[in-house]
Amino acid sequence: MLRRRLNRLFGGDEGRVHSRTIYVGHKSCPPNEAYIPPKFCDNRIVSSKYTVWNFLPKNLFEQFRRIANFYFLIIFLVQVIVDTPTSPVTSGLPLFFVITVTAVKQGYEDWLRHKADREVNEYRVSVLEDGRRIRKMSAKIKVGDIVEVEEDETFPCDLILLQSSRDDGTCFVTTASLDGESNHKTHYTVADLESDLQYLSATIECEQPQPDLYKFVGRMHIYRNSQEPDVRSLGPENLLLKGANLKNTQKICGVAVYTGMETKMALNYQGKSQKRSAVEKSINAFLLVYLFILVSKALVCTTLKYVWQSKHDETWYNEKTQKEKETNQYLKMFTDFLSFMVLFNFIIPVSMYVTVEMQKFLGSFFITWDKDFFDPEIQEGALVNTSDLNEELGQVEYIFTDKTGTLTQNNMEFIECCIDGFQYKHGDGSSELDGFCVTDGPVNKIQQKAGREREELFLRALCLCHTVQVKESTKQRQDQIDQIDQIDQIDQVDGLGLDHEFLDPPQKEMGFIASSPDEIALVKGAMRYGFTFLGLESKNMKILNRNKDVETYELLHVLNFDPVRRRMSVMVKSKTGDILLFCKGADSSIFPQVRQEEVERIRMHVERNATEGYRTLCVAYKHLSAQEYARADADLREARLTLQDREEKLMAVYNRVETDMILIGATAVEDQLQDEAAQTMEALQGAGMKIWVLTGDKMETAKSTCYACGLFKKNTELLELTLRTLEDGGRSREERLHDLLLEYHKKAVQDAPPVKLGITRSWSVAGQDYGFIIDGASLSMVLSSSSEPNSRRYKNLFLQICQNCTSVLCCRMAPLQKAQIVKLVKNSKGNPITLSIGDGANDVSMILEAHVGIGIKGKEGRQAVKNSDYAIPKLKHLKKLLLAHGHLYYVRIAHLVQYFFYKNLCFILPQFLYQFFCGYSQQPLYDAAYLTMYNICFTSMPILAYSLLEQHICIEVLLEHSTLYRDIAKNAMLRWKLFLYWTALGIFHGLVFFFGVRFLFSNPALQDNGQVFGNWSYGTIVFTVLVFTVTLKLALDTRHWTWINHFVIWGSLAFYVFFSFFWGGIIWPFLKHQRLYFVFANMLSSVSAWLVIILLILLSLLPEILLVVLRKPRGPHARQKKSSAGDPQSPQSSARPLLTRTFSDESNTVI
Amino acid sequence: MMASSYKDEDGHITVSGSGAAAGGGGGSLRNKKPENTAFKQQRLPAWQPILTAGTVLPAFFIIGLMFIPIGIGLYVTSNNIKEFEVDYTGAEMSSPCFTCSQNFSWNSTKPCTCSVPFHLDQPYESNVFMYYGLSNFYQNHRRYVKSRDDSQLNGNEESLRKPSKECEPYAKQGNKPIAPCGAIANSMFNDSLELIYNDPNGSKVQIPLTATGIAWWTDKHVKFRNPGAENTNLTVAFQGTTRPVNWRRPVFQLDSDPDNNGFINEDFIVWMRTAALPTFRKLYRIIQRRSNVHPTLPCGNYTLEVVYNYPVRSFEGRKRMILSTISWMGGKNPFLGIAYISVGSVCFLLGVLLLIIHHKFGNRNNPAEISH
């Protein structure tokens, strides 16, 4: 990944040439010019990282870049070089194991990539060369080749569409594998080309490869008989992307423009920056503590060793070797220090990293396996893109949610419209002949209607002003038209208008495809009122009007929607030759562009609709005279041909054209809330999370959604910081901003009751709830105030206000602003954990910015899902994901981390203490096999099983009582206090183990035959106590005993016993020292050893058991009693008393 | 995982981090509907023990009630074990071995002997075990512990000729390999101790000491083997090797009994099992009980005859001779008994205390919690 990024950086020189020239079919054109074959990369896709040759060095290098691996490598090397107490095997073996497992895993993944690459690269494609069709490998395609693709095939590289088998020069593609949008998209051939491509002589000039899938600018020069070349503009509609599929079209020919790693698909493949979880940071902090302990232990021992040696000089029975005598004193000290480091290095467990990784990897499967996340509609469950953040799901403090498609379904329904100030609501359909039902209007005009002409103009506008496509093949469509014709005839016979039921069959079959669902809603709405859009055929839009006549309009230009203009227009030419411009867009963007007289009447409707939670759009039109059109046409064509700054130029033209229009009316489209959106929000707020809605929508709509979701309640006092409030008071915005901020700050922060113990309390205090609303413009003022100190102050004020509000609504946000807000909160005091959830491409930036990014598999394509860490089908799944999965994962991994440090501390402490009894000679207490196996075999499986299966509180309870989530807020289980508790426990256990056995060994004659035990028996007894204690300690902590837990806990202990017998039962020919020969068996033959083992285990676990009792009584009984007695009210109203009640009951179970 | 997008019929790109999630994501897409198994839905039947005061309190009492009797039993047993210690280091002027300890020299050919008188107040009824004890002797020093060649001791001919490097600086003398090599073997305890009973009637009776059965059976019969085939003459087997520097006799002359000679000499094997702590004791001899009528060691005056070969003055060590009887729990050690009694009583007391607390405050708990 890094390499690719670097390449892109260094490739800058090449990038400075802004365009590339492609010779279609490798023909030099014009012929007299010298043809220099340009150098482009071939079409080979390389997604693999390694080759057979560089796998080992490269993989090893990458693995040892990890700080932990590097540390263990150093320890291993020290063991190899310096004469150390433990053999290099003890640390080498685990390291080797870790490295090998990782390497195998990565190798396997890379092999899969190789395989997939090969499959793609060796895929046979047809290439036209000199009029002949040649099959060649996909990898061999060069830029300039003319490639033929057949139906349902995938494009092998980015192609400019030259020829299609369809008559109208279009082809259909699906880009599901690129952006997840499964609808058919239409692409167009370059206009007016020779039918025989063999004789085509042309060059294409286009921009350098860039990753934006929806942008492409190019120019095609066609040379015909050495005339001046024809120039055609090329846009994204001419470009067929690698990875897309050809549909509904028999075959196409295209010229390759971008190949291999320069295709848009390959450029879009990029790794996300690695996100690290809070737990990982805690681990690193603890590691530092342990590293400090380790170094200080080694230092203490080294010092004491030399103090001791000054008194106990070399004894006659234990002379130094020649080498030792010769070594320099200081060097000796240093190597002694290293030796002690090696002896105690097990305190920092290599296996913890492995276990944590495995836990995360395996644990994430439970999310994908969860059937509650399965959505029958899209036939998909949850998706985990990264497993590194599982536990972060249990730590979320701020949720940033998108509105459209996340809180709301993005399922638009046409509710009503307003024509000329008269409101039309769709009735039951039978109430009036034309389907209109005037329910409300300006007071003085009740029961009146706008003129029929205006109505029809409005409906035509709805039918024409969009980019909707009709989804079906030509043949079917033809059938349908026939069918409609038949209906027509019937209607004519009856002499009646249209009845809706009649239109139903075609309506059902007719699917519409559009970039935005409200366009479909509008078209469908128009259809209900009698105007049916039949589709676009070779630049002709067909409409079935109320009289069952097919009207045809020639589509001249589409002025596409963009978020800055917030409107779109079409220019059409009617049969009569009138040129009309229809424009629809947000009220704020339409009102300034229309004649002012109509505005007021419609504004009222628009605003009322907005407060009801509807999406409103205004529709306007304009007659264009022939001259006006000619000018606009020329401008547009010119702008479309430019290679650079095309966007800006187009925008300027659009703005010039879309002026002085006449407002016809407005539409209201309902945006339905997601399933259980309100309940989910309520639960999340109950869990102590603050929910911010970040939307690009306008304030009124967003506000109503907030009310609908229960984010704002009736008694919530809203603090508004929007352009409207800023412009009140007639002073400069800057001043007003200052005053408002101060005022709100006073209200929400200073006057608010002091918050004790953070969120837990503030909930129950029945203070005033505040909601904060800010819009994009005000936000940018807050964030980028003119003077630096002011800006910092504003930012702080803003943050403080927001943090004291229950919910915050940010409307009119640009995608980048969303990310800015997330970043602002993320970096604020206390570094709260943030979560972003969204479904559209506009949410990607905030999804990437937040600690945890959640994508919703909604209707707005796959961009969000692709960039998210977790993807879920519906908003309601967020509740379980956070409250149950997040909570459990956090508790599991926190316990895992604490336990790992604990078990290694009490493993190494006796070894440290033993130094005081062996003359600081680095004599290990345990045998090398035990040192190595302790973390790998004897104690690793139980904790892994625990960290995968533990449910200290069962999932139902977690979901029911969202307040439980607060118990683990702010990394509660990895705070220093708890860390100290575990450390103290580890030290206590270590002391008990060592000194218990030490006192036993004051008389080493422990067998009933008077024979004595030596140092290895000593170590083995300590080790046995150790293994049993740490395993049983975990057993005590386990609250959820499945058969797996039983199996691994008792299995590990049994394995330890079995292994010890086995290891001590044989004289191992490869061992230099038979230290443990029959030590374990002899130990078990001693009654005293048995007794001391039992005693020490019990003594170690006693404080644990004691703590259990000292805690207040609790348990499922209390829980059951309470919840069965719980009032059968609605969840909303019962939420508050439930919280206070159950919190105390449940909180105890956590610990 | 760019490539995965090609494989996926559904056309969903599985973008996975470089990390471990690759499999996780991909897997879920292939078999779409998650299986409804107890394991995958995290609904495995589980036993959910809740440790409450109600369940734990009885445990305290049970532990208390079990440990106290065991402790008392252990304590009584330990107290019944008779043990007698004689320090014969000879560091003090008054000690009979003072001369020997002062005049010690590695080169002296004439062994120095001394006799230490002592008095047993009570008769020793059962088998009596005779230990020698050393203090301030770091048998657990790392350099010392590893200074041995287990393969040589196991009778390996090659290791006999070429001792392991670990034995340095006691691996070779001149060109000859040392057998047994290493610091442990070299420093083998070589005082010989004799016990003489001064019968009240004036006669001195030498107590018969058994030198076998003092080492672990597995050590004697498996771990330690003499080189060469069975029944070969040990002198021949050890030919070409030399005795350790501090030894007075070569290894094949440790004992006249061929089953207790060479590497399988039990005194040697016992010494080779390095002690855990710098003050230790090792089994030296066993005094078997001869008859049911007479005690093994009647009370009275004894003399410990020492052939003083082992210097400890240089490292301020002490040498002791210990006579001890043995019970089922081994030698005398009051620690276990005391520990069991104290842990048992603490448990019991805690149990009582907690019961009171629980009883008194348990009922008031629930209202108190709500304010919490």
Image: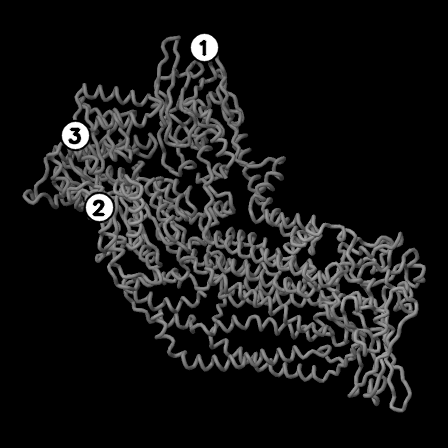
Amino acid identity at mark 3 = Met
Q: Residue at position x 41%, y 27% from top? A: A250
As rendered, which of A560 and A116 lies closer to the eye?
Answer: A560
What residue does disc 2 label? A700
What residue does disc 3 label? A661
Q: Position of residue A353 (x, y in %)?
A: 55, 52
Q: Earlier in the sequence, mark 3 or mark 1?
A: 1
What residue does disc 1 label? A33
Callout 3: few (<14), some (14-19), or many (20+) C-alpha neighbours within 10 Å?
A: many
As rendered, which of A43 and A542 lies closer to the eye?
Answer: A43
Q: Position of residue A583 (x, y in %)?
A: 21, 32
- Judge whether residue B354 can be spotted in this image: yes
- Judge whether residue A409 can be spotted in this image: no
Q: Chain of mark 2?
A: A
Q: Secondary structure at mark 1?
A: loop
Q: Earlier in the sequence, mark 2 or mark 3?
A: 3
Question: From the image, which quarter does the C terminus of chain A lie in?
Answer: bottom left
Disc 2 to disc 3, C-alpha distance: 25 Å
Q: Is residue A653 above or below residue B105?
A: above
Protein image colouring? one colour
